Each structure stands twice: as C-alpha cells, then as structure tokens.
Amino acid sequence: MSTFNFKSNNENETKNFAKSLASKLNIGDIIILSGELGSGKTKFTEGILEYFDLQNEISSPTFTIVNEYNATNFPIYHFDVYRLEDEDEFLAIGGEEYFEKGICIIEWGELIENLLPKEYIKISFLKDNTDENVRILNVETFGKNFDNYFMED
C-alpha cells in the first residue's frame, strides 16, 4: 500500500486532479471515494467523466445505486452505495460483476470494502476547517502498482 496526499484549493483543482488520474485508468480499475457529504466526491467523478467527454451525462446514482457511462473503449460505472443496507445488498444487485467490465467509481465505497478485489484506489476527501473551498485528498493504493498513476507527467 502507498499513500499520497493532494491539496485542492477549489473544485477546478479537484476536477483537474481527477482528469489526470482518468488519463491513466484501465479496465478493471476501481476507485473508492470516501468522505462526508459535500466533500468533493461528485466533483471528482465529474472530472473523470469530463476527461472521457461524458460531462453532459453525469447524474447522481444515489437512488439508482449505479449509473453506466459509455466511454469510447469501455464502460465507466459510477456507484453510490450510501443507501445500501449491507454488503449483501451490493451482491444482490450483481455489484461484483462490474469490477472487471470497466472502470468502477464507488462513492461511500468503504461500506463494501470487504467485497473489493485486492487491487483498488481509495481516495478520502477531507474538508479544511479554515477554508471552505480547500479539500485534502488522501490517496491510498492497494495491490498492483498504482503509484505511477499519481506521479507528475
């Protein structure tokens, strides 16, 4: 496991960080987004979708659990598992079947961390108490070497 921190001073920096990561993503990559409401998880997802020119299609999967977006070469699955009762409910919707089919972005993914493959990226969003626009993104990588995903080009 490796850990990286990124300080975002505003929504645009969060989206740009996400776009940089999106440029390196591959089928089977899983990104867990963790953090309180309003901490930047959805803005981050918007950045990833913007990289794939899908920014006009984004909608929150809060009530549908998962939204599917079709990038040029693969699907992107955007989950919001906040409303799930437990891990069994994720299994009941066939959640694990998505992991190898495309890129998975899972908001509140810490709720199903026991079900994840050994290789994934977890990004925790923390609000700054002194500036309402600042976020600290704590990135943890598990499994295969994702470290090069977070190095400057």
Image: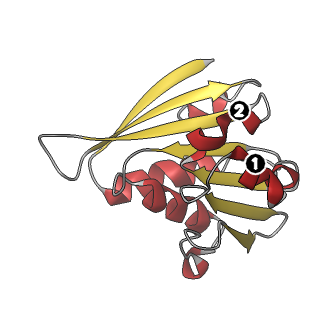
Residue 122 x, y percent position in the rendering:
57, 36
Pointer 2 local density, CA inside 10 Å: few below 14, some 14–19, many at least 20: few
Q: Residue at x 51, y 65 (%)?
A: 46
- From the viewer's perspective, tell me whether residue 149 is left or right of residue 123: right
Q: Residue under label 1, please give it.
A: 88
The three-letter code of the residue at mark 1 reads Asp
- From the viewer's perspective, tell me whether residue 40 is left or right of residue 140: left
Q: Residue at x 74, y 23 (%)?
A: 143
Q: Secondary structure at mark 2?
A: helix
Quarter of the rendering occupied by the C terminus: top right
Using the rendered image of the protein, determine whether residue 153 is visible from the camera's viewpoint: no
Q: Residue at x 60, y 55 (%)?
A: 81
Count of picture labels: 2
Q: Secondary structure at mark 1?
A: helix
Toward the top, the furthest residue is 1
In the rendering, which numbered label is found on residue 114? 2
Q: State the residue in front, 23 or 124.
A: 124
Using the rendered image of the protein, determine whether residue 20 is visible from the camera's viewpoint: yes
Residue 92 x, y percent position in the rendering:
82, 57
Residue 47 x, y percent position in the rendering:
51, 61
Whichever of callouts 1 and 2 sits on the residue coming sooner in the sequence is 1
In the rendering, which numbered label is found on residue 128? none
